[in-house]
Image: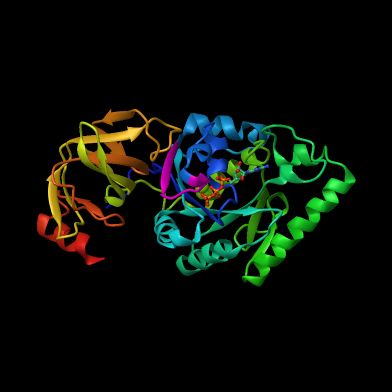
């Protein structure tokens, strides 16, 4: 299938890291939400998905994009949150299967922790490009905060002692990455982004460094992944959750990585007792910048393009399997072929 006229699709980023590193809080800062505070036991227990549309992204990177020649070409991006608790290794694995680029969040003052190493192992196995967000820089003693500033601007305002302490933490993270077999560098000193992992210092609390992180992710996806990110009609969709929704019955929350889903589409879904064949009754998404797993008013769509987190309402979804695939029956995919494929993995 030929790609449609160079149209880029939204990349998918997954946020990985040890429990309490600040993954959800980082997304909260980007969304201007407060999901982390409402979580049961204050830990994430599900995969989340949030769409960041282009205009919001443009605003978020403005502080550091001004004066550079960077042109944002992405329609937006899809951010996937994962739990850091050790018992959710399957969800981290599913999240990393879905993404184009990963953000490994490390708590600066703790350095690498068990699930940091586990995440790196998963990224290595799948050869997924990643950047490190070195979080909680605001916790440095005597740190002077400039909310939502670019890193260079805020770092320039710190005292010599603060900078020295920062350098020690940065060196440790770079050393720990090298012990895992990666060259790494502070993002704005990176000599070769193909060979060195970029470390972006951020604070999910104050927003410092977040513009740099988003600009880097946008630039990397445009440069290194233009080919993969070109929009194609092949459906690639994975079930995250099977959930009841009042008025809609059983629904499935899906990450649509690629392709277009339409209301009325005949779909085949991986089920507990074999493939489920049904038709899409409603296609729902949360509002832009809203987390899919939070109770939220949903927007109805007649069609949705990947990448997007989407809720599908249809008959007979009770036995659908989280982690399974969704395929559409069309001229390129017969019902029989779709049934075989959804049950293949
Ligand atoms: P799990 O999803 O359970 O793995 O944790 P998480 O990585 O999503 O961590 P979360 O975002 O829930 O943050 C954990 C705690 O650290 C919360 O109390 C946050 O308020 C705090 N925190 C996160 N980022 C920062 C930061 O940049 N600075 C400060 N001072 N605190 C932060
Ligand atoms: Mg979390």
Find the residue positioned furthest to the right: 160
Q: Is residue 321 magenta?
A: no
Which residue lies at the image location 31% right of the left edge and 46% below the top edge? 254
Q: Is residue 281 left or right of residue 18?
A: left
Describe the colour scheme in one phrase: rainbow
Q: Nearer the viewer, residue 266 or 202?
A: 202
Q: Is residue 44 left or right of residue 109?
A: left
Which residue lies at the image location 82% right of the left edge and 40% below the top edge? 156
Please provide the residue range marked out in magenta.
Answer: 41-51
Find the residue positioned furthest to the front: 41
Tell me which corner region of the image, top left, top right, bottom left or bottom right, holds residue 146. Answer: top right
Where in the figure is residue 34, as x and y percent of width and height? 52, 34
Tell me which corner region of the image, top left, top right, bottom left or bottom right, holds residue 153. Answer: top right
Q: Nearer the viewer, residue 225 or 215?
A: 215
Where in the figure is residue 80, as x and y percent of width and height? 45, 47
Tell me which corner region of the image, top left, top right, bottom left or bottom right, holds residue 263. Answer: top left
Q: Nearer the viewer, residue 110 or 261?
A: 110
How many marks the image carries: the answer is 0
Where in the figure is residue 147, as x and y percent of width and height? 69, 32
Where in the figure is residue 344, as x and y percent of width and height? 22, 66
Q: Is residue 108 left or right of residue 100?
A: right
Q: Is residue 221 left or right of residue 279?
A: right
**Quarter of the figure that contains the C terminus:** bottom left
Which residue lies at the image location 59% right of the left edge and 60% below the top edge? 194
- The quarter of the rendering in which ligand 1 is drawn is top right
């Amino acid at each position: 299938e030929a790609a449609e006229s160079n149209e880029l699709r939204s990349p998918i980023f997954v946020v990985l890291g040890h429990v309490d590193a600040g993954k959800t809080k980082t997304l909260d800062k980007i969304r201007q939400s407060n999901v982390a505070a409402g979580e049961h036991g204050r830990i994430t227990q599900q995969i989340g998905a949030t769409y960041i549309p282009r205009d919001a992204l443009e605003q978020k990177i403005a502080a550091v994009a001004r004066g550079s020649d960077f042109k944002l070409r992405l329609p937006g991006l899809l951010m996937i949150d994962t739990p850091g608790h050790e018992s959710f290794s399957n969800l981290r694995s599913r999240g990393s299967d879905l993404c184009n680029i990963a953000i490994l969040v490390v708590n600066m003052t703790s350095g690498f922790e068990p699930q940091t190493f586990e995440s790196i192992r998963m990224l290595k196995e799948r050869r997924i490009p990643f950047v490190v967000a070195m979080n909680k820089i605001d916790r440095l003693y005597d740190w002077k905060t400039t909310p939502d500033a670019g890193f260079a601007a805020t770092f320039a305002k710190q005292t010599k002692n603060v900078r020295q302490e920062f350098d020690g933490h940065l060196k440790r993270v770079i050393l720990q990455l090298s012990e895992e077999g990666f060259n790494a560098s502070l993002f704005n000193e990176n000599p070769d982004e193909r060979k060195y992992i970029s470390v972006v210092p951020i604070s999910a609390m104050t927003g410092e460094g977040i513009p740099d992180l988003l600009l880097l992710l946008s630039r990397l996806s445009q440069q290194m992944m233009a080919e993969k990110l070109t929009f194609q009609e092949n459906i690639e969709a994975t079930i995250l959750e099977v959930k009841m929704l009042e008025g809609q019955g059983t629904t499935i929350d899906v990450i649509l990585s690629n392709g277009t889903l339409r209301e009325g589409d005949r779909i085949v879904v991986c089920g507990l007792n074999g493939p489920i064949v049904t038709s899409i009754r409603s296609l729902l998404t949360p509002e832009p910048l809203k987390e899919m797993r939070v109770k939220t008013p949903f927007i109805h769509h007649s069609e949705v393009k990947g990448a997007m987190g989407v809720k599908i309402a249809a008959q007979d979804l009770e036995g659908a399997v989280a982690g399974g695939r969704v395929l559409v029956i069309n001229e390129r995919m017969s019902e029989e072929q779709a049934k075989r494929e959804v049950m293949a993995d």
